[in-house]
């Protein structure tokens, strides 16, 4: 336990902390505040609820000079809701510092009132990347005096296609500033962003409490080669029936041609299944990864090498359709399941001839493998196990200056869809993908075809 009073904070901030009823720092605060107050760049893995907002809020308020009427701190958030929450939290922390001017600037809000409130520079801006970028471009906002830049929920901002906007913003603000990056997950892209925008960052990771540590349940089933497909369909079907909305599975095969055959067979049996392997064109591979990540594919069948490109950290179910050749690969595969606070299931199918490979895994683990009997019923024809979303492809992308917000705008505006029915949006150079709730996908397609996106007509089609 570390008390806030051990930090060299301004008395006004300590008073606010007391008023808010905080006594001890949370683990993220205890680890990140000392280097942040020292002026270091920090990259912190922190979930909502970890106290991250107070951590960067206190740090940016500590270095704020209220008498200088310039923008000194910029906080970028993925959504308006988060920007509102962050603004509120910072206002509370700043309650005992007179005359702090904080402005929230988010997209989806009319520009006029924002421009009016920018006649004098605020000290702090909290906003979404697209709109902040626009104000900097228009020079309604001046970034020359920025001392602290915060990227909050950076992983979500990347997911939402804000990478370019963020890079552009950084190009428009003071060269020398402190960058604080907070992210719930650390995919490679986050590391790449940190490398690009941070200087020798101090890395903060806080272990999830023991009861939130991922737990993996393993099951080994012995099956005859001729039974494998039926066994797989049965296992996947059972998982799908348990929770169709959430359940996604990753199925590993050892050979590329087997990947194709298994994916086709699953598709024939009514699953939203796709294949992923190294023989595919990059563009097709990207498309498959997009469709799996946006939940319009329920089962991904892949080789080990191809699955490395998969950014999804943990899935509820991983199946080794073929047992891995070596124990290390097996460990890698099962590590794809098991999420914080939830048990993941890793199932391995093993034919009698493959038993020696199972023995190797057992030897490495040092414990007996959990073999379970599996009664394989022959296929009962086609039952639908469809993914909850469907993907629409727009034949336009960054080259056409198309941004995720434009697509969202077209769908919620003229097309009349509710934002809750719109999933992940991915914009590539010449194409864009948007996931829509399956039941509404055809309606969305018709409306997009009939209407315009950003005032233009683009070709739009649905992926089955
Ligand atoms: P956040 O992770 O920033 O979304 O914060 C989660 C919640 O924890 C917020 O409601 C904060 O008010 C609260 N909080 C932040 N820091 C502390 C602390 N040191 N002690 C108790 N509560 C805190």
Image (tube, grey):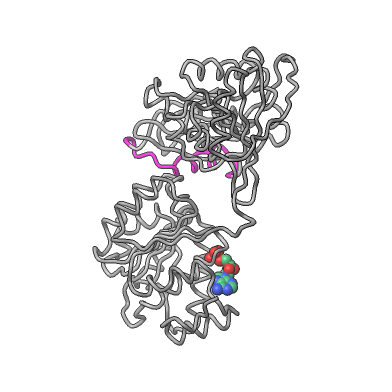
Hey, which quadrant is residue 432 in on the image?
A: top left
Residue ID at (49%, 84%):
5
Residue 35 x %, y % = 37, 71
Is 300 on the left-hand or right-hand side of 134? right
- Residue 85 in view in this figure: no
With respect to residue 453, does 193 lie above or below? below
- Where is residue 348 drawn, in percent x and y? 61, 29
Place of residue 281 in the rendered image (x, y in percent of width and height, measured from the top left): 37, 22
Residue sitting at x 42%, y 47% = 158
Seen from the viewer's position, the closer of residues 182 and 164 is: 182
User: For residue 76, which quarter of the picture?
Assistant: bottom left
Is residue 416 magenta-colored? yes
**Residue 113: horizontal and vertical position, in percent?**
44, 63
Q: In the rendered image, which quarter is residue 234 located in?
A: top right
Q: In front: 301, or 116?
A: 301
Find ligand 1 in the image and state its quadrant: bottom right
Question: Which span of residues is magenta-colored?
Answer: 399-419
Is-magenta flag for residue 296?
no
Residue drawn 36% across the image and 63% down it: 202
């Amino acid at each position: 336990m570390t008390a806030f009073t051990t930090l060299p904070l301004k008395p006004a901030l300590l008073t606010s902390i007391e008023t808010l009823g905080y006594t001890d720092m949370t683990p993220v605060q205890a680890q990140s505040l000392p280097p942040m107050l020292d002026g270091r760049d920090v990259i912190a893995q922190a979930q909502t609820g970890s106290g991250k907002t107070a951590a960067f809020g206190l740090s940016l308020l500590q270095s704020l000079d209220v008498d200088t009427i310039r923008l000194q701190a910029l906080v970028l958030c993925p959504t308006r809701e988060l920007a509102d929450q962050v603004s509120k939290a910072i206002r509370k922390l700043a309650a005992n510092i007179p005359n702090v001017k904080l402005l929230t600037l988010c997209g989806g809000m009319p520009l006029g009132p924002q421009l009016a409130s920018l006649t004098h520079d605020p000290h702090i801006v909290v906003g979404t990347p697209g709109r902040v970028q626009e104000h900097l471009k228009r020079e309604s906002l001046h970034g020359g005096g920025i001392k602290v830049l915060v990227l909050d929920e950076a992983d979500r901002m990347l997911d939402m296609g804000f990478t370019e906007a963020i890079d552009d913003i950084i190009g428009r603000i003071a060269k020398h500033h402190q960058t604080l990056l907070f992210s719930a997950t650390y995919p490679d892209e986050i590391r790449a962003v940190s490398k690009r925008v941070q200087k020798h960052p101090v890395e903060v990771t806080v272990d999830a409490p023991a009861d939130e540590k991922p737990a993996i349940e393993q099951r080994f089933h012995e099956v005859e080669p001729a039974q494998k497909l039926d066994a797989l369909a049965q296992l996947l079907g059972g998982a799908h029936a348990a929770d169709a909305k959430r359940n996604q599975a990753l199925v590993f095969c050892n050979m590329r041609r087997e990947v194709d055959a298994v994916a086709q067979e699953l598709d024939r049996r009514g699953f939203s299944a796709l294949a992923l392997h190294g023989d595919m064109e990059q563009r097709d591979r990207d498309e498959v990864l997009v469709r799996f990540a946006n939940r319009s594919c329920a089962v991904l069948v892949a080789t080990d090498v191809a699955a490395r490109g998969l950014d999804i950290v943990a899935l509820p179910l991983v199946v080794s359709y073929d047992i891995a050749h070596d124990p290390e690969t097996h460990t890698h595969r099962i590590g794809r399941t098991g999420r914080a606070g939830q048990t993941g299931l890793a199932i391995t199918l093993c034919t009698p001839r493959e038993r020696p490979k199972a023995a190797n895994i057992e030897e490495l683990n040092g414990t007996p493998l959990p073999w379970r009997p599996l009664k394989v019923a022959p296929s009962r024809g086609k039952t639908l196990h469809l993914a909850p979303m469907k993907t629409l492809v727009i034949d336009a992308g960054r080259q056409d200056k198309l941004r995720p917000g434009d697509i969202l705008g077209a769908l919620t505006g003229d097309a009349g869809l509710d934002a809750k029915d719109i999933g992940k949006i991915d914009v590539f150079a010449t194409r864009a993908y948007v996931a829509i709730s399956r039941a509404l996908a055809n309606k969305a397609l018709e409306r997009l075809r009939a209407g315009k996106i950003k005032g233009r007509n683009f070709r739009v089609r649905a992926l089955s």
